[in-house]
Image: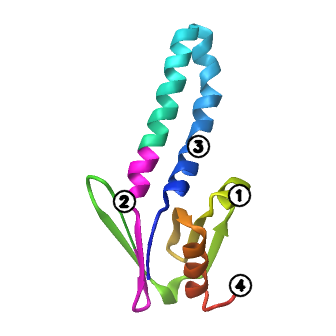
Amino acid sequence: MEIRCSAAGALVMGLWWWVPGLALSPFVFWQSPVAGLVFLVGWCGAASLICRVRLGSLRCWLRGGELAVSRGVLFQTTRRMPARFISGVTRLETPLLRRLHASVVVVHSPAGALLLPGLQADDARRLESALTGGRP
């Protein structure tokens, strides 16, 4: 099974990155309205672009009892996690993610957590089912 990040999921992740820029923008608007507008447009544009490019490189495989996640634009990295060491899977669906048929999946293991943002909802359900052995 191979899973990729959806375009709608990448869009939602970019929108989530708008929140810190919106929180910081009043401090820049206080200096000058033009500087605040430039900051706000620059932050939101950069957040959307970076999320789209970074999440576009996300690929996930579940083969032979191993979960492998590959990501990276310039430097490709792969993280492998044996399925027998996975202690839990959490699937997050906000109302916006649900409307765009996307999910965020967090895979837990004793060594840490693996975040898989912006997956298609059907793929996230299949991955969750495969990693938990069909248990809800």
Above/below status of 106 relative to 88 = above
Mark 4 highlights which residue? 136
Q: Is residue 66 magenta?
A: yes
Outermost residue on the top side: it is 32
Residue 73 is left or right of residue 36, and the answer is left
Q: Which mark is residue 94?
A: 1
What range is drawn magenta here? 50-68
Say whether residue 35 is left or right of residue 58: right
Choose the circle earlier in sequence order: 1 or 2: 2
Q: CA distance from mark 3 to mark 1?
A: 13 Å
Q: Position of residue 108 (x, y in %)?
A: 57, 74
Q: Residue 15 shows which numbered tag? A: 3
> In the image, is residue 22 part of the stretch drawn in magenta?
no
**Comes first in the chain, label 1 or label 4:** 1
Vertical order, 29 against 136 (above or below):
above
Badge 4 or badge 3: first in the primary sequence? 3
